[in-house]
Amino acid sequence: MGYLRVFVYGTLKPGEVNYQSYCAEHIVEYFPAVANGFLYELSVGYPGMTHGKGNVHGFVLSFQNPKVLLELDKLEDYHPERLPQENEYQRQKIPTFGLDGKYLWTVWSYLMLPEKVKLLGGKLLPSGCWIGK
C-alpha cells in the first residue's frame, strides 16, 4: 500500500503557516520537488499555480492516511462536485521531478484556473518559488 502524495508550493510547505496545522502530525516524509507550471503571488497573500511550461518549486509530502486529502480540500476551497469556476483551486494529478530533473511521482496538487489568478491580482513569480511572509 502506497502513500498519499501531494505537491505543495505555498502555505503547506514545511516551515510555512499552514504546514503545522494541516500536515506536521500526519507527514511520513517529504522531498523537495519541481512541477511544470507557472506560479503567481496573489493579492490575498498566498500563491496560485497554473499549468504551463515553467517550473514551480515546492515539496512532495507523503501521508499514511488518505483522509488528510479531505482536510486539504477544505483549506483549498475545493469540492469535486462543484463546477471548476466555483472552486478556488482544482485538485489534479500532476507529474513531479526531483531537483536533478528525474521523475519522482504523479501526485495530487492544487492548481488555479488562469481566470481565478487574474481575478485575485496574480503577479507571475519568474523564479517559480514562493516564500511566505
Image (cartoon, rainbow, N blue to C red):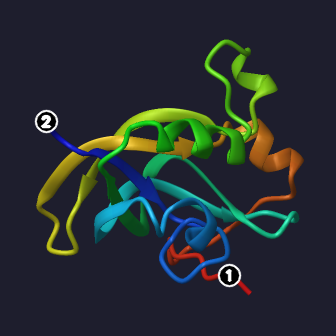
The residue positioned 79% from the left and 63% from the top of the image is: 42
The C terminus, quarter of image: bottom right
The residue that disc 1 covers is: 132
Q: Which of 6 and 90 is in front in this view?
A: 6
The residue positioned 77% from the left and 37% from the top of the image is: 115
Q: Quadrant of residue 121?
A: bottom right
Q: Which of 32 and 124 is in front in this view?
A: 32
Residue type highlighted by circle 1: Gly
Residue contact at pointers 2 and 1, CB within 8 angstroms: no
Q: Which of 48 and 55 is in front in this view?
A: 48
Image position of 81 with respect to 121: above or below = above
The residue positioned 53% from the left and 34% from the top of the image is: 91
Q: Can residue 45 be seen in this view?
A: yes
The residue that disc 2 covers is: 1
Provide residue 110's location: percent of width, then percent of height. 55, 44
Label 1: state its secondary structure: loop
Residue type highlighted by circle 2: Met
Provide residue 128's location: percent of width, then percent of height. 50, 71
The N terminus, quarter of image: top left
Label 2: state its secondary structure: loop
Q: Which mark is residue 74?
A: none
Q: Can residue 54 be seen in this view?
A: no
Image position of 3 with respect to 57: above or below = above
**Neighbour tally class for label 1: few under 14, some 14-19, many 20 plus, Cα within 10 Å:** few
